[in-house]
Amino acid sequence: IYNLYPGNDGIFYIGKRNHNGFAAFRMLNDSTVSLIDKGFDNLAIRHFYECKLHPIVWMASEKGLIAYNKSTRNYRVFDESSGLANSFVYAILAQNDSSLWISTNHGLSHLFVHYGDHDQITTTVTNYTSKDGLQSNEFNTGGSFKSNTGTFFFGGITGVNWFNPARISPNPFKAKPAITKIFVNDKLYAKDTADYIKSITLPYKQNTISFTLAALEYTKPEQNQFGYMLS
């Protein structure tokens, strides 16, 4: 067993190892239990979070974060293609039903969750890695804890990170790209005024053009990324 999670209404959830999925049961007395639900026998379930206001049980697995509707037994898997830092999920800590933090094999992911009708769940994801100060990108099964004051603890392969999630917010300033130099046929064409040039007309013999770029936001310049398109 990876995890024993006390859910709502006296239900307990068991996350099983060796790709045996999960089971949900209720204690009838000191020696008798009633099996209520089970599933995902092809997965190892490492952690749970049961929503307080929605019939959703979130489950951590090596294939992604599972949103399981305990009423309809429908589910959806959120993985790297959904924006998570990594599909191998170790733990889930919640500020509330709409704000989930998960530990993975490549950092932490913060999910803002919107619950719609008919099992429609959408998320906005912000990822954090060792470049943001994490002990490592890799975390561990069982290495998570939420204190009475709301502080989150996530344990990994080289140490522990702890923080108050209410005090964490993404950088609101988007890096503005600027062209710093223009080269034509490998010769400098423009430098200080490069970013103000809107168009260039060249003779056919000048058929090689290149640029150097800068991102004008310096909070964490090593994490700035450029995207471009030729048309």
Image (spheres, grey):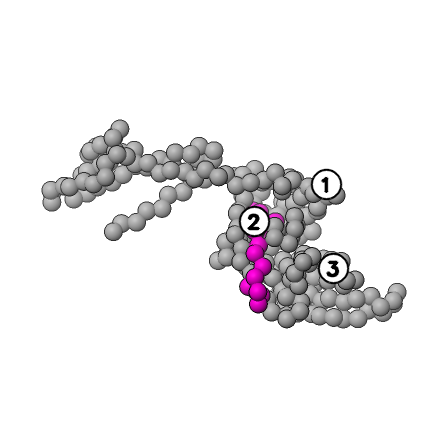
**Amino acid under disc 3:** Gly
**Is 102 within the magenta?**
yes
Rounded to the nearest whole Å, what is the CA distance between mark 1 and mark 3?
A: 20 Å
Residue placed most toward the observer, 46 or 200 = 200
In front: label 2 or label 3: 3
Q: For this view, does 35 lie left or right of residue 63? A: right
Q: For this view, does 213 lie left or right of residue 5? A: left
Q: Which mark is residue 109?
A: 2
**What is the crowding at mark 2: few (fewer than 14 residues within 10 Å), some, or many (at least 20)?**
many
Rounded to the nearest whole Å, what is the CA distance between mark 2 and mark 3?
A: 23 Å
Majority secondary structure of the magenta segment?
strand
Residue indicated by mark 3: 7
Residue placed most toward the observer, 19 or 15 = 15
The quarter of the image holding the N terminus is bottom right
- Picture quarter containing residue 197? top left
Label 1 or label 3, whichever comes before in sequence order: 3
